[in-house]
Image: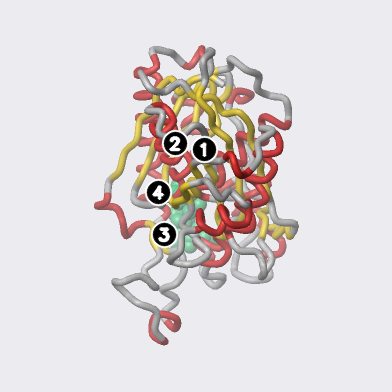
Amino acid sequence: MSGNNIMIKSTGAYLPVKILTNKDLEKIVDTSDEWITTRTGIKTRRVAADHEATSDMAYEAAKIALKRANMDPQEVELIIVATITPDMFFPSTGCFVQDRLGAKNAVAMDVNAACSGYIYSLVIACKFLGTGSYKNAVIIGAEKLTSITNWEDRNTCVLFGDGAGASVLIPSNGESKLLAFDLGTDGSYGEELFMPGGGSRNPASIETVENKLHSIRMNGNTIFKVAVNKMKKTFTNSMGNAGITTEDISILIPHQANLRIIESLRKSLHLPKEKVHVNIDKYGNTSAASIAIGLNEVYEEGLIKRGDIIGFVAFGGGLTWGSAIIQY
Ligand code: UT7
């Protein structure tokens, strides 16, 4: 693939301080630590403070990534924030992050592809860098999902958490590159995982608040089945496009929605446990942030080195799905 000579120069992440345990949730809804652990693999999740918006977490993650890249914010040319929990409808969360960073020379935008948002943003940024339009990019996955959680709905409130992860991308002349990607969308499943209220379809009103339309709704069963199929298919497509097999993968960082989904994918790809990064137990499902947080984690834990082949795969609201394979 031409135009994909990029390097993930550095990463950063931010997780809010407050930890919400399964035991805490037992006091809020009719659930149990045992159910949540066995059905999802989640033990704890982070909850942003009232004063913390998505852009605040995105800013903290980006600040770390830029410091590690030894880059002045004024050098940044492109900022993409992947999120479904923007600070406001507009301006974009990217604009708030640009301002906080003092990245005066950067173009900023948001991408809404739910849990696939980090992969979509990675591919978009690679294309801008690959064509020479911009010399660098900061891509950020950031979510405050607890701000759109219905705390009376046990089907969803046990699943989600808050956090942000950022990556600095630069062009590469060496072996680092985006080897392949595969993206997909099926809008016919749009209302299987969505937030009905607040947009132009159902503008905010007393009724939308009373009917709890400003929170996540999900048909978990349907999503689960499609997720398992699509994640395997998209990652297999990317491996085919890259001309590699699972043997070549150093580590796979999947979106963290459910440990059973991750395990099913891992087994179907015949990957050993140590090659699949899992942190859902600590952070739950952080949608667009999960892969970005995972990548920063494997970096900080010393699990990756330059030249390694890293896989990303995600699935989420839209429905959207996607995968990417990079040589780090
Ligand atoms: O990140 C974006 C994409 N999202 C996903 O990929 C999520 C995909 N879906 C899932 O991960 C799973 O479907 C869930 C974790 C959401 C649910 O697991 P499940 O095994 O599909 O459970 P279910 O929805 O079939 O529910 C089984 C039972 C039901 O009770 P009955 O009807 O059998 O009596 C639920 O009411 O579990 C009940 N239940 C709960 N029980 C205790 C649902 N939520 C809870 C809960 N605690 N929190």
Residue type, numbered disc 2: Ala
Q: How many marks?
A: 4
Q: Is residue 189 left or right of residue 295?
A: left
Residue type, numbered disc 1: Ala
The residue where tag 4 is placed is 113
Q: Mark 4 and mark 3 in contact? Answer it, CB < 8 Å.
A: no
The residue where tag 2 is placed is 125
Q: Is residue 206 left or right of residue 142?
A: left
The residue where tag 3 is placed is 218
Q: Mark 2 and mark 4 in contact? Answer it, CB < 8 Å.
A: no
Disc on the earlier residue, 3 or 2: 2
Q: CA gap, disc 4 to disc 1?
A: 18 Å
Disc 2 on helix, strand or loop?
helix
Identify the residue at image location x=72%, y=25%.
Answer: 302
In this rendering, the label closer to the viewer, 3 or 1:
1
Toward the left, the furthest residue is: 188
